[in-house]
Amino acid sequence: MFKMLIADDEPKIRWDIRNAADWKGLGIGPICEAEDGEIALRKAAGFQPDIVLVDICMPFVNGLDFIRRVKRILPESIVIIITVYDDFPYAQQAVKLQVFDYLLKPIDRGQLLESIRKAKEALAHRHAFRSLIRSSDTELKKKFLLSLIGGRLTKQEAQEQARLFRIPFAAPCGLMVVRVLEKIVLEDTPDAWDRELLLYAVQNMASDLISGFQPSGVFTDEKGNVVAVAPAGSAAQWSEASEKIVDAAGACLKRAAVSSARVLPGGLWQVAQAYPELLEETERKSCGAPIAVLIRSYLERHFSEPGLSLQTAAEKIRISPSYLSKILKRETGLSFIDFLTRLRIRKAIQLMGNPREKIYEVAEKVGYSDQHYFSTAFKKVKGVSPAEYRRARGSGG
């Protein structure tokens, strides 16, 4: 559907145009009206019409001035003049302003519908062209980033191509590698994911979750990992983003995932060196026993449940509590309660970055119904109380 604005000071003209056709059936709608040039400008800025029908002679701001100003805020909109003036100078100015069509009053219904039909066709071509450009741009950026992580570019080539895609070359750069462990299903689910579709879903989630780091590049590498590259000054925030992607894969796709993330202070050129290291780290994490990955993924998704215990976790994963405890100790060096405590405190620190979150609210969100117990656990892990930790980092009370 294409939005349309009718700007004319004559109510009858506006009524005639609005009722000239079943606009909705023709793919036009919603329709907005304005009775003078000032109102038309305000409505154009907010409504953002695709097609504008405007009278040349309007109060406060005349039609030609309106067109000049609206073209600055809506350069892609199509403007059709409606006027009583069959005057060559007006037509000349309309051509200079790149007006799409010029209709004389009284408006002929057939001419109006033909003009709108052509406008729709032009808009459709523009949208298709922009979509093609975006698609081509995405594919070219992927080729550049694949060449970069593969070490197939000289520094000058990398710098030139980064400039082309408006990616800062020297600024600290975040790099992460995410691997989905397709065969480890976290819950009984009827969902069957094709590998390509699964990677596409993870790539989309990653794009959403690192949208705060721009301009970013998210793509699938030649080994089937999702890789993200973006300017990132904070190692903690970048690491948190990678953890959220893993969490989202578990929560939404019911698949275990592992990730490795790093901020490179030397910028984009360090990606070629860091990528193999992160790849090796990710492979090492994914090569653990499937049951260990399953245990960690389950705890990552259920850590906020106050009643979570060794017994309940073992029942859900369908292994004995002693076996769960043994696997966790072997893989992490921690007992069940120590692993869970550290996990909760790590999540709590992420939440405490928001100064609006009260300490008791953070405690509840990470599975502690008792704030005093939370503070004791926090101090055991970090050496200071939650309030002291927050004050030291200037995040409020």
Image (cartoon, helix red, strand yellow):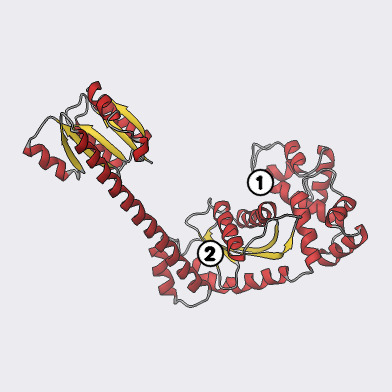
Q: Quadrant of the N terminus?
A: top left
**Element carrying mark 1:** loop
Give the spatial CA distance, label 2 vs label 1. Answer: 34 Å
- Residue 393, numbered circle: 1
Q: Which residue is mark 2?
A: 219
Is residue 89 shown to the viewer in this render? Answer: yes
- Residue 111, numbered circle: none
Q: Quadrant of the C terminus?
A: top right
Q: Is residue 352 above or below residue 208?
A: above
Q: Residues within 10 Å of mark 1 (few under 14, many from 20)?
A: few
Discs 2/1, front: 2
Which amino acid type corresponds to the residue marked 2 in the rendered image? Phe
Labelled pair 2, 1 in contact (Cβ < 8 Å): no
Q: Position of residue 290 (x, y in %)?
A: 78, 67
Q: Residue furthest left?
A: 88
Q: Is residue 152 above or below residue 233?
A: below
Q: Earlier in the sequence, mark 2 or mark 1?
A: 2
Q: Is residue 330 above or below residue 339?
A: below
Is residue 173 shown to the viewer in this render? Answer: no
Of 311 and 274, nearer the camera is: 311
Q: Quadrant of residue 239?
A: bottom right
Q: Residues within 10 Å of mark 2 (few under 14, many from 20)?
A: many
Is residue 237 toward the left or the right of residue 359 in the image?
Answer: left
Q: Position of residue 88 (x, y in %)?
A: 6, 39
* Numbered marks: total: 2
